[in-house]
Image (tube, rainbow, N blue to C red):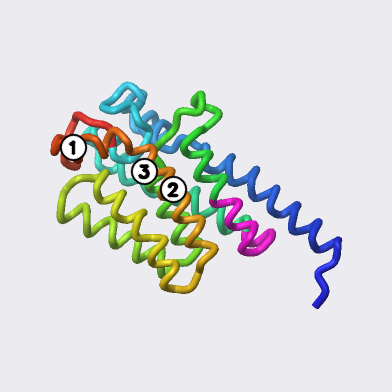
Amino acid sequence: MEFGATNWQMLALACEAGLVLGYLLGSIPSGLLVTRAFGLGDIRKTGSGNIGATNVLRTGNRWAAALTLILDAAKGAAAVLIARELGGDLAAMWGAFSAFVGHLFPVWLDFKGGKGVATFLGIMVALSWPVGLMTCATWLGAAVLWRISSLAALIAVAAAPVYLAFWHQYYFAGLAAFLALMIFGTHQENIRRLLKGTEPKIGAKVGAA
């Protein structure tokens, strides 16, 4: 079947739409909105100052932390699913990347966002649900075993590209590897503490996970 100029233009428009919608979805500061809704104040003034679920947990409200985790994952998944509907897997990849960047660098918060783990998990589930579930299971298993959020996150995101490659989804594996590298970048302080043995356990009030 021919793939003419009109088709390419439509695909390009779909990818552009995926980029814009992905960023807007990804930049929604779930943690900040949830903590305010729960009357917990400004999460940026609690613990590490991060807007992610791990820091929300430091407020002592598990429901707020769980809701933040779900919403951060959902916005990544939504970006992928909408973009895929518009332009297939290529647009879905652009939507995924843009949503991830939006979470890390939201324009509404002076480009100071979360560390990307929950959004990454949501993206993986939407791109390939079997791999997404395996990645989530890896994260959960590591969290239960070591009780260190950052370590569980790093293990899970590092495993995701391997899972995707095993399933012969090489383009998705490349994207996952790139996003995983970005997550390792956002966890530099955590990695230093892990190497020193000073990284706090899940639920601790000190640290930056």
Magenta segment includes 85: yes
Q: Name the residue under label 3.
A: 184
Instruction: Tell me where residue 63 appears, x and y as whole percent.
Output: 28, 43
Instruction: Tell me where residue 168 appears, x and y as whole percent.
Output: 48, 73
Span shown in magenta:
84-96
* Distance of label 1 from label 2 (alpha carbons): 22 Å
* Pointers 1 and 3 in contact (C-beta within 8 Å): no
Magenta segment includes 93: yes
Residue at screen point 42% across, 61% down: 161
Position of residue 45 in the picture relative to residue 20 (left or right): left
Q: Which of marks 2 and 3 is in front?
A: 3
Quadrant, the C terminus: top left
Question: Residue 37 sits in which quadrant?
Answer: top left
Callout 3 amino acid: Phe
Residue at screen point 54% across, 48% down: 97
Q: Mark 1 points at which residue?
A: 199
Neighbour tally class for label 3: few under 14, some 14-19, many 20 plus, Cα within 10 Å: many
Residue at screen point 38% across, 47% down: 117
Q: Name the residue under label 2.
A: 119
